[in-house]
Image (cartoon, grey):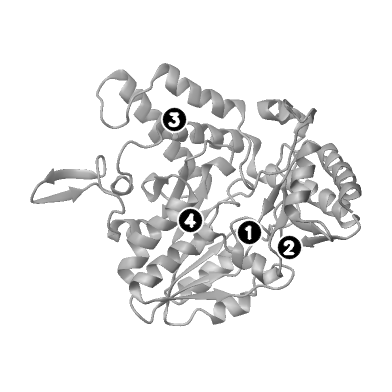
Amino acid sequence: MTAPTSRVQPIDPATVRGDFPVLARQVHGKPLTYLDSANTGQTPNAVIEAVDSYYRQFNANVARAVHQLGDEATTAYEGARDKLAAFIGANTREELVFTSGTTQAINLVAYSYALPHLKPGDAILVTQMEHHANIVPWQLVCERTGATLKVAPITESGELIVDEFVKALTPEVKLAAFTHVSNVLGTVNPVRELAKACRQRGIASLIDGSQAAPHLPLDVKAIGCDFYAITGHKMAGPTGTGVLWARREHLDAMPPFFGGGEMIREVSFEGTTFADPPHKFEAGTPNISGFVGLGAAVDYLTGLGMERIAATEQELLAYATEKLSAVPGLRIFGTAPHKAAVISFLIEGAHAHDLATMLDLQGVAVRSGHHCAHPLMQFYGVPATVRASLAFYNTPEEVDRFIEALATVRKLLM
């Protein structure tokens, strides 16, 4: 992520914090300082009200009823698909499959695209900084097909070694899967360059965009990948929502992953004819209220402007990094020049869980653990880190409160 230009006006957090009711609460008698947005982004009133409105005014199933409520539910549900298509720069709405999140989206590609394509001797390439959701599904299909998993290395600063990634794109590689933004390091990968290298070699590419969608302007056409996955609850939307974007030719060729209602055109005991994409991948009653809420989240983020969100968070990242770097004995994991507002760290002599627990008693919510990235923890030789992740609704004053709480905790632990 490049530093914001002077032409991009950052968001004044004071103008948006009132949109997020949870930010006004207290924890253990202290004002909440929420620094865990990489785990779950907070939800604005507009999203809460959209979900509430669905249940209060037009709670009905989609695509099945001819009555007024069913029509209104379907309009709102499918309207979210239109909003998301515009949000990520898709060519058409039919390229977006609704999922429960990035994990389901990647599993859909693993079982519906990779499994039929792979054979013994083939390979899938991932990077050393991946979330488990972008590792385990590939391991499972490799076990079933005889394919192997290759891993592209990173530097100590948390940057992908692009030359090594490209070198690893050998003829046996049939798919490369990599994150846009690391959930642990904050590293923003050069996804256009990586996708281009894959495309030049006839290798399909999948991008885990779960940590990018809440923070960066997106354009999947410009990126040039084959698959892109996002998660709703990290981008101000409800839990249990997400999207897989895929090139239409892939969706046309891929068999269904789940079977049931709504993904069919006609069923008989002799056989079934499936619906066109994306609906052939959306069996059963979906999370209707969730996607109505996700559509409202897209409206909210778009209204603020993704470039402004990125500029705001870069200012917060720079401020928080400077403050944390002055803490004695503190080590930051992930110092790539292009980062999102994620800072993983440890303090010498203190366990990550102890730090996070005691920070919580000071009203500061951070994440501790392996962050669903065991291989990355093994690379750094640590069992866990503390992760502070910022969003546009955070303030410099909250960063100061975090640093003060950290000083208090250090005195108690040292």
Going by the numbered disc 3, the residue's amino acid type is Ser
Q: Position of residue 326 (x, y in %)?
A: 91, 55
Of discs 4 and 1, which sits in the foreground? 1
Camera-near label (4 vs 2) is 2
| Residue at position x 72%, y 51% in the image | 353
Name the element at disc 4.
Answer: strand
Distance from disc 4 to disc 1, alpha carbons, whole Å, reads: 15 Å
* Viewer-closest of 352 and 266: 352
Q: Which comes before the other along the chain, label 3 or label 4? A: 4
The CA span between labels 3 and 2 is 37 Å
Q: Residue at x 50, y 64 (%)?
A: 135
Answer yes or no: do the residues labelled 2 and 1 have beta carbons within 8 Å? Answer: yes
Residue 97, x across and y down, in percent: 39, 47
Question: Image quadrant for the N terminus?
Answer: bottom right
Q: Residues within 10 Å of mark 4 (few under 14, many from 20)?
A: many
Residue flagged by tag 2: what amino acid is it? Gly
The image shows residue 45, relative to residue 84, as above or below, that is above
Classify residue 392 by image quadrant.
Answer: top right
Pointer 3 or 1: first along the chain: 1
Question: Which residue is disc 3 drawn over?
Answer: 289
Task: Residue under label 4, please give it.
Answer: 228
Seen at 58% across and 42% down, the residue is 235
Give the Cα distance between marks 3 and 1.
29 Å
Q: Amino acid at mark 4?
A: Tyr
Q: Is residue 123 in sight in this rendering?
A: yes
Residue 69 sits above or below residue 162 on the image = above
**Is residue 5 in view from this perspective?**
no
**Residue placed under numbered mark 2 in the picture:** 334
Give how far apart the Cα atoms at labels 4 and 2 are. Answer: 24 Å
